[in-house]
């Protein structure tokens, strides 16, 4: 078509210049026959070429419609397969109901109470892995409702209630999460006792006035218990604290509301699927990073003049807060990009467990729901790397936790990953996959003057050891991702960490396990359950020797 247009231009120009008309055919009148020139031929060819292009466009349009229909059918098939796979991975919530009822009957017998459990929504399908991890928090809440909420049978009769208390567990799925409510018809929260215990534990200053909602939230604080005596069911202060911690690990939440004399209701929410994660894709340098959508509070487009400047650098004002502005590229150890003059900046506001972060990213690529792949043992020690996912275009998106990264650029503030100890108490790291063991060990050690930091397995312990150097470690053997023997071997191969005393505390008390631990360099070996006095005496000696050697 381009060639024909060029010919048309040349012929037109030549006719304009010559001013000549085509000669009539000899012997015929000019009106008897049409006279075709080169101009007519070129015009006809252009018209035919345009008709060919139109036919080609229609053919491509039909193919595009067919591909679109095939894509829709493919998407429907994928959704069907995903639904079938989800059904295979799931089971009704009612499968754990016998376990909960058995635990409630046993606890009621020990506490001298009477209670019945009513479950609504038991047919709700829940992932097997999620259901297994929900059993522990639900048992804690049932036990708490029975011991602290349900009154003794005689007392209930005296105030006009049935002798047997009622605990109702409601399960219902929503679009994004599984919602559970556990309500009892007991006495409700004793706010005066909560205030007194919180003040005694140093969680609440005595002269500070807080509302009832804040007082109710205090029952999830570590070490707080309203029980007047320690029993097998209450008084240790690790029940609701453990529930809150486990739900945070699941990416969920827990709340409570209470009416005096009418009972108490705990509301839980956890993501429906642990294998998929809603994320927001962003660009930082040459990387495509996935940030958890549950932590992202807002995305902002700010002009340079909207930023605050002081001696510490740039800051962002957001909802009555002033947050330091940190460039994501620097968190990843890359040079900070130089923005164009006057260009707006994209800032992500993140929140996690009371910590806030204003993160500058290069671009935002929208929200996705990605299947999370475990990084594997080779990359599990990389700080901040949660996992990775394969995108539709074949690229890799790294799932990063910015709160666990440190700035690579010198002179910049770091994002805290573990709390710093302001005093000179010896720091003990407890590494155990059991939340109850970690919390119980923390209570024992802090009661005897030790500072404590906790890790769920060897991989998380190595991440913490990048920032802190404990005086001693308590180490379990059987843990996911990296067990105790593997972690001990890594410690003894590292020049910076090899002098840390390690006490193995495990239920494996066979001689071959003990010999293996001492062969790898363990300082002591204790079986579960351990004697508190023996452990404290052992740790005191190890920490004193560590300080003397330093």
Image: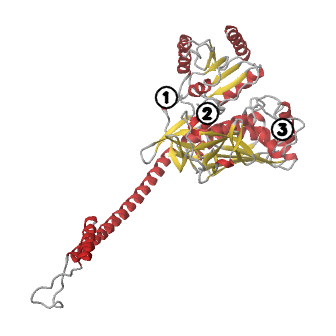
Q: Position of residue 517 (x, y in %)?
A: 56, 14
Q: Can you give x and y, in whole percent of width and height, for residue 302 in the image?
A: 64, 50
Snapshot quadrant of residue 472 = top right
What is the number of the mark on residue 404? 2
Neighbor class of circle 3 (other Cα within 10 Å; few <14, some 14-19, many 20+) is many
Q: Compute the Cα span from label 1 to label 3.
A: 44 Å
Residue 94 spot, x, y in % from top left = 60, 46
Whether residues under marks 1 and 3 lie with C-beta atoms below 8 angstroms apart, the answer is no
Picture quadrant where residue 45 is located: bottom left
Quarter of the picture containing the C terminus is top right
**Mark 2 or mark 1, which is nearer the start of the sequence?**
1
In the picture, measured across the screen, residue 333 lies left or right of residue 302, that is left
Find disc 3 in the rendering and name its residue: 194
Q: Residue at x 78, y 36 (%)?
A: 112
Instruction: Report which quarter residue 233 is drawn in.
Output: top right
Q: Nearer the viewer, mark 1 or mark 2?
A: 2
Quadrant, the N terminus: bottom left
Q: How far is disc 1 from disc 2 in space, using C-alphas?
A: 18 Å
- From the viewer's perspective, is residue 481 above or below residue 85? above
Q: Which element carries disc 2, helix, strand or loop?
A: helix
Q: Residue furthest left?
A: 27
As drawn, the label of residue 425 is none
Q: Residue at x 26, y 71 (%)?
A: 8
Tell me if residue 206 can be seen: yes
Q: Is residue 494 above or below residue 25?
A: above
Which of the two labelled residues, at mark 2 and mark 3, occupies the earlier sequence position?
3
Residue identified by numbered label 1: 377
Q: Nearer the viewer, mark 1 or mark 3?
A: 1
For the residue labelled by badge 3, is the local secondary structure a helix, a strand or a loop?
helix
Q: Nearer the viewer, mark 2 or mark 3?
A: 2
């Amino acid at each position: 078509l381009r060639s024909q247009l060029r010919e048309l231009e040349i012929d037109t120009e030549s006719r304009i210049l010559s001013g000549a008309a085509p000669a009539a055919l000899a012997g015929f009148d000019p009106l008897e026959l049409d006279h075709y020139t080169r101009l007519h031929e070129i015009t006809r060819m252009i018209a035919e070429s345009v008709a060919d292009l139109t036919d080609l466009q229609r053919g491509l349009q039909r193919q595009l419609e067919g591909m679109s229909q095939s894509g829709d059918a493919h998407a429907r098939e994928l959704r069907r397969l995903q639904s079938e796979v989800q059904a295979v991975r799931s089971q009704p919530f009612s499968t754990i109901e016998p376990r909960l009822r058995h635990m409630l009957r046993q606890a009621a017998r020990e506490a001298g109470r009477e209670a019945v459990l009513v479950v609504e929504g038991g047919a709700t399908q829940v992932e097997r892995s999620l259901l297994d991890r929900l059993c522990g928090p639900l048992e804690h809440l049932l036990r708490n409702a029975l011991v602290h909420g349900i009154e003794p049978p005689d007392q209930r009769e005296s105030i006009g209630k049935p002798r047997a208390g009622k605990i109702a567990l409601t399960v219902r799925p929503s679009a994004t999460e599984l919602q559970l409510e556990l309500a009892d018809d007991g006495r409700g929260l004793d706010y005066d006792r909560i205030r007194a215990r919180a003040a005694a534990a140093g969680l609440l200053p005595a002269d500070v006035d807080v509302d009832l909602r804040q007082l109710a939230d205090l029952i999830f604080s570590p070490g707080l218990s309203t029980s007047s005596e320690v029993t097998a069911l209450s008084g240790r202060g690790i029940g609701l604290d453990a529930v809150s911690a486990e739900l945070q690990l699941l990416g969920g939440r827990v709340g409570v509301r209470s009416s005096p004399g009418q009972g108490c209701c705990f509301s839980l929410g956890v993501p429906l699927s642990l294998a998929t994660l809603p994320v927001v894709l962003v660009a930082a340098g040459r990387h495509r990073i996935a940030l958890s959508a549950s932590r992202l509070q807002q995305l902002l487009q700010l002009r340079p003049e909207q930023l605050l400047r002081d001696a510490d650098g740039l800051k962002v004002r957001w909802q009555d807060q002033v947050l330091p502005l940190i460039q994501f590229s620097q968190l990843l150890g890359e040079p900070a990009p130089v923005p164009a003059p006057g260009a707006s900046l994209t800032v992500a506001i993140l929140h996690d467990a009371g910590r806030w972060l204003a993160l500058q990213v290069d671009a935002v690529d929208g929200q996705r729901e990605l299947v999370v792949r475990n990084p594997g043992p080779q990359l599990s020690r990389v700080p901040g790397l949660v996992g990775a996912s394969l995108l539709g275009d074949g690229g890799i998106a790294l799932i990063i936790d910015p709160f666990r990264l440190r700035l690579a650029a010198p002179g910049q503030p770091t994002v805290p990953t573990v709390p710093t100890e302001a005093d000179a108490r010896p720091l003990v790291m407890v590494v155990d996959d059991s939340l109850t063991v970690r919390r119980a060990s923390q209570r024992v050690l802090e009661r005897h003057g030790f500072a404590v930091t906790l890790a769920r397995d060897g991989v998380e312990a190595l991440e913490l050891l990048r920032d802190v150097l404990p005086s001693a470690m308590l180490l379990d053997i059987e843990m996911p991702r990296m067990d105790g023997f593997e972690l001990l071997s890594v410690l003894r191969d590292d020049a910076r960490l090899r002098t840390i005393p390690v006490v193995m505390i495990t239920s494996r008390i066979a001689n071959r396990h003990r010999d293996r631990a001492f062969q790898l360099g363990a300082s002591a070996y204790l079986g579960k359950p351990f004697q508190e006095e023996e452990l404290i005496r052992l740790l005191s000696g190890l920490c004193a020797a560590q300080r003397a050697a330093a």
